Amino acid sequence: MLAQIGPAVFTPPAGGWYTPLMRFAPVPDYHMHTPRCNHATGSVADYAEAALRIGLAEIGMSDHSPMPGGFDAAWRMDRAELAGYLAEVEAARDAFAGRLTVRIGLEADSHPGSEAYVRDMIEAYPWDYVIGSVHYLGDWGFDNPDNLDAWNGRDVEQAYCDYYAAVADSAATGMFDIIGHPDLIKKFGHRPPPGSVRVQAAELAMLDAVRDAGVALEISSAGLRKPVGEVYPHGRMLALAAELGIPFAFGSDAHAPGEVGHAMDTCLGMLTACGIDAVCRFEKRRRFAVPIRALP
Ligand SMILES: [Zn+2]
Ligand SMILES: [Zn+2]
C-alpha cells in the first residue's frame, strides 16, 4: 500500500517561503536555478536581490547542467546556453560585489555513462563548486511530477536501495563537491517498509562513500515544499553523517527568487542538534568552514 500522495507542487505563501525570525546567523545558500532549466523563474539578479532582502551575505547559483545525448533535455539548459549562464552569473557577481558574494556553481546529474562529458564540462570552467545529484534510476526520472504514475506498482524498498547505491556511486566519481538532496527518493512520500534493514544498510553504505570521497552533503529545505514535507536528508541520516564527520552545505534549491533561503533556520537547527557547528562555503572548488552562529 502506498502512502496517500499529495499534490506534486505547492503554491508559495504570499511574501515567499523564507521565515525571517532566525535563531541563527544566515549562512550561504548554494542551490538555486535560472529559467534556462525550463522549470524556474527569475534572473540571477532577482535571486541576488532576494538574498539581500533576507540578509544573506553569500549565495551560489547552481542551475541544472547540460547533459549528453538528450538526457532529460526538457529539464535542463542546453549546452549552447552554458556560456550565457556563466556570463549572467559573472555579471551578477560583479554587480553585487561588496554587498553579496555570488558564487558560480552547477548542479550536474550523476548518471552512468555521462561521466566523461560531465568531467570535461567541470574542467572547462573554474567553478566555485559543483553539486552532483541523482534524479534518475536508469531511464526513470523518479522525482519528476510528470512521471508520478511510474511509481505505481514499484517495489519501493528496491527503489530506495537502488537510489542510495546511485548516490554512493555519484560520490565515488570524485567529480562533485556537494552531494545534492541526498534522500530525494522520498520526494512524493513513497516510503519503504518501516525499519527496512536493506534500506538502512544502503543509507549507511552511501554515507560511507560520501565520507571516503571527502565530499559535502547538502542539507536542503526543498523537501519541505514537496509532498513529503521533510528536509533532505531525514534526521536519522543527518545524525549518522554527523557521527561520520561529513561536512554539510545548505541549499534551498530555489526555483524562484521567493524560495531563496527558505527554512535555513530549520535546517541549521537540525545541524546544531546533531552537534554540527559549521557548514561549508566554496571558492574555486576549495572548501572552507562557516561557523553556525546563534543570534543573541
Ligand atoms: Zn530543478
Ligand atoms: Zn536536484
Image (cartoon, rainbow, N blue to C red):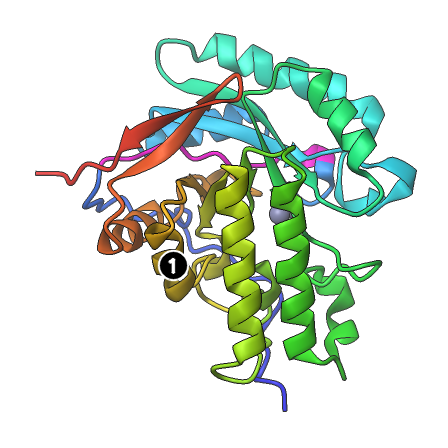
User: Would you place residue 43 above or below residue 272 in this image?
Assistant: above
State which quadrant residue 35 falls in.
top right
Magenta stretch encompasses residue 33: yes
Q: Position of residue 256 (x, y in %)?
A: 55, 41
Q: Position of residue 194 (x, y in %)?
A: 49, 84
Q: Position of residue 283 (x, y in %)?
A: 47, 18
Q: Residue at x 14, y 38 (%)?
A: 295
Magenta residues, dominant SS class: loop
User: Would you place residue 151 above or below residue 122 in this image?
Assistant: below
Q: Nearer the viewer, residue 192 or 230?
A: 192
Q: Residue at x 48, y 34 (%)?
A: 30
Q: Is residue 8 visible?
A: yes
Q: Secondary structure at mark 1?
A: helix
> Which contiguous range is marked in magenta?
25-36
Q: Residue at x 62, y 66 (%)?
A: 8
Q: Residues within 10 Å of mark 1 (few under 14, many from 20)?
A: some
